[in-house]
Amino acid sequence: MSEPIIKVKRLAYVRVSSPDLAKAEAFLRDFGLQVAARSGEAIYLRGTDPDPHCYVLTRGTSGVTAIGFEADSAADLEKIAKIEGASPIEKLDEPAGGQVVRLRDPQDMQVEVVHGQAALEPIQAAPSHAFNMDGRRPREGALPGVRWGPAHVRRIGHLVLESGDPASVFEWYQERFGLRKADEVLLPDGRTQMRFASLDRGQEFVDHHVVGFQYALDEGARVQHVAFEVGNFDDLMAGHHYLKAKRRKAVWGVGRHRYGGQIYDYWANPFGVIHEHWTDTDLVNEDSVPVDCDFADLEEYWGPQPSLSFVVSRWNWTAVRNLAGLLVARLRASRRSRSGAGR
């Protein structure tokens, strides 16, 4: 495999449009993001980490309209600007400043590569404490109070891109931005159901995945969900109950993923865009060896089954046919497992 054009530093932000900014902002506040700035029709939201804003909310048809990665250097930005289909380097006229190059991925998603944005001052994160578990008892006295209210989002962590051909979309991102395969889940016919991709930062350990490339059952193209790290397990659960009390739409959770290891909790905004809280991810580096798994054999460590609104982004006959095929494969795998256990 040839060297990528650049190796991006991190997932920087998403741009999300909504037909009703007030309703969308209210959800994001309940979810645990905080307003960093307002400019015209855009609202810039952040986590508690000192990174620049990680979420740009604008008015429009509901959905993710752009994803942003941070380049390591101005030189890397120049490299991206030279590839076919890329914009020139432009000044980013937003509160965090910096420069940007824009291009379109194979499923027509706008991808922005930025450099030189100004960091923010960190703000108060979730309360932290030790755990008296696994035979160790480092915490003495009473548990520090777990605050009632929204979870404390720290930062954007990853997103999932759905398409009819996730393997080829992954290759596009790999060639340009240096993403590397972490693990993969395969469909019954051997094609990719999900390819988890991490940043490539050499020996530095990074999140298990920064982008997941997923097969869309309706074979459409979209960002299926965006995911944000919260402080800790107590913070995630406090956020869960707060969102529940606010009558927000729960989509899937709470549970722990098999691949990536995160404790997860998924919620939809009032217009159907799925947002994930997670904590406690696996870490990988260039020495980590990817694992392949058949979809029929995949089980999360613990948690409920995903809802249909999580599994199927848009219903059509293609989605019905593909979902039926996956359910049949899962049923056959379950029968084989029971048969083997009985021997």
Image (tube, rainbow, N blue to C red):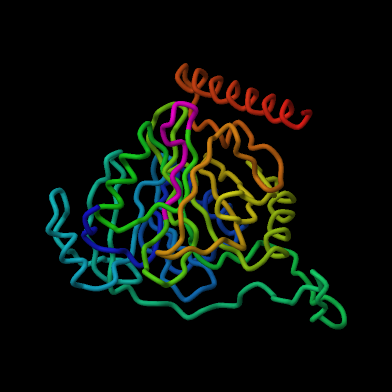
- Does residue 208 sit above or below 249 in this rendering? below
* Residue at image point 74% right, 54% down: 241
Q: In which quadrant of the rendered view does residue 213 lie?
A: top left
Q: In which quadrant of the rendered view does residue 113 lie?
A: bottom left
Instruction: Decide if residue 164 is on the left or right side of residue 288.
Output: left
Where is residue 190? Give x, y as percent. 43, 31
Instruction: Decide if residue 222 is on the left or right side of residue 5.
Output: right
Instruction: Decide if residue 342 is on the left or right side of residue 99.
Output: right
- For this orientation, the residue located farthest to the right is 141
* Residue at image point 21% right, 73% down: 74
Where is residue 201? Give x, y as percent. 37, 68
Where is residue 102? Give x, y as percent. 23, 55
Q: Which residues are magenta?
A: 187-197
Q: Is residue 165 magenta?
A: no
- Does residue 191 sit above or below 317 in this rendering? below
- Does residue 230 sit above or below 290 in this rendering? below
In front here: 334 or 162?
334
* Residue at image point 45% right, 49% down: 196
